[in-house]
Image: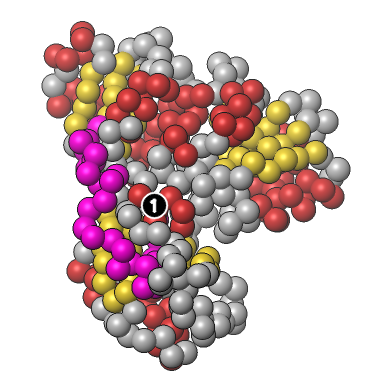
Amino acid sequence: MGKVYFVGAGSGDPELLTLKGKRVLESADVIIYDRLVQPVLLYLAKETARFIYSGKYPKNHVVKQKNINQLLLEEGRQAQIVVRLKGGDPGIFGRVGEEIAALRAAEIKYEIVPGVTAASAASSYSGIPLTHREHSSKVTLATAHRQAGEVLDFKGLTDNGTMCLYMGVEKADSTRQKLLEQGVPPQLPAAIVEWGSLGRQRTLTTTLQELIKTIDQNQVQNPSLIILGEVIASRKGPDWFEELPLFGHKILLIDTKKIEFETILSYTQQGADTYAIQVGADRDRRYDEVHQHYLADHSFDEIIYLDQELTTIHEKQWAILKKEFIR
């Protein structure tokens, strides 16, 4: 019998992974990872580790939850270390309760390694404190995606408090209407943080009244965090993360040799949204599927060839190379 570790990958910035999460990832025999996990974390895996994608898209679950539960049972029954790598914190809207219930029933051992949740990461990286002596003495974490018929009582939650709505863009209109119906003032400050703590982060400030207009005009999409509360007044324009020298740069690193994790961090530490691909016949082919999924969702403005012999590759040749990973 093996052991399953539920590891919070943090939100966006790969350095938000905890030290314990890093240690467990490095020892894993199997890593089952979600769509919103920053996949450069897989560069920490040992050479014999297997990768299994369990990504789920809004309204289109690539792998249904019951199938993920069954996968955990199958892998957990073997004498190996299994890591279930989840974005943010596994215990905050990560459905970890359903997955550990399946393991308990099968008497499979597990541990939960907490991660930095989106509310902490997105607010900190956009210069918005969740609590403030003058504005907020409580924080509410809520999801806009609720069970059928369930109604969230917002009354009082934004009074001297901060509310964070996870993945709330899709349901923003109905959520806004419910807030107004329950007496939340229309001029309550609101912020939307898209792709929080990644170099492609966008932070938009508005009011509850203008929330939908702001989302539509800026074509905001998930993953986004909506923050409501007077604390938003603390933001005075671009903050520390958005002022880093490479913030806003979307950089793809390419090399014929294995790309070290520390090399990737040398760019993300300067604010860049960075991904890395090893190419060529000698590449680690475990990552081919990882690249397929990630490049299907993301585009990059700059390509840096770490191998000098690759600098002669033109854009047309890169387009051909890209097809190697997107089929």
Q: Residue furthest front?
A: 133
Percent position (x, y) of residue 288? 43, 26
Indicate the quadrant where residue 215 lies: bottom left
Of 263 and 130, the residue lying toward us? 130
Question: Is 230 a magenta residue?
Answer: yes
Indicate the quadrant where residue 30 lies: top right
* Mark 1, secondary structure of its residue: helix
Tell me if residue 61 comes above or below residue 153 in the rendering: above
Of 211 and 15, the residue lying toward us? 15
Determine the residue positioned at 55% across, 16% down. Answer: 47
Q: Is residue 181 left or right of residue 103?
A: left
The magenta region covers 222-251
Quarter of the image with the N terminus in it: top right
Tell me if residue 43 comes above or below residue 90 in the rendering: above
Determine the residue positioned at 43% across, 65% down. Answer: 132
Question: Is 94 a magenta residue?
Answer: no
Tell me if residue 224 comes above or below residue 200 in the rendering: below
Determine the residue positioned at 37% across, 68% down. Answer: 231
Residue linked to disc 1: 124
Percent position (x, y) of residue 161? 47, 73
Crowd rating for badge 1 (residues with CA inside 10 Å; few <14, some 14–19, many 20+): some
Quarter of the image with the C terminus in it: top left
Q: Amino acid at mark 1?
A: Ser
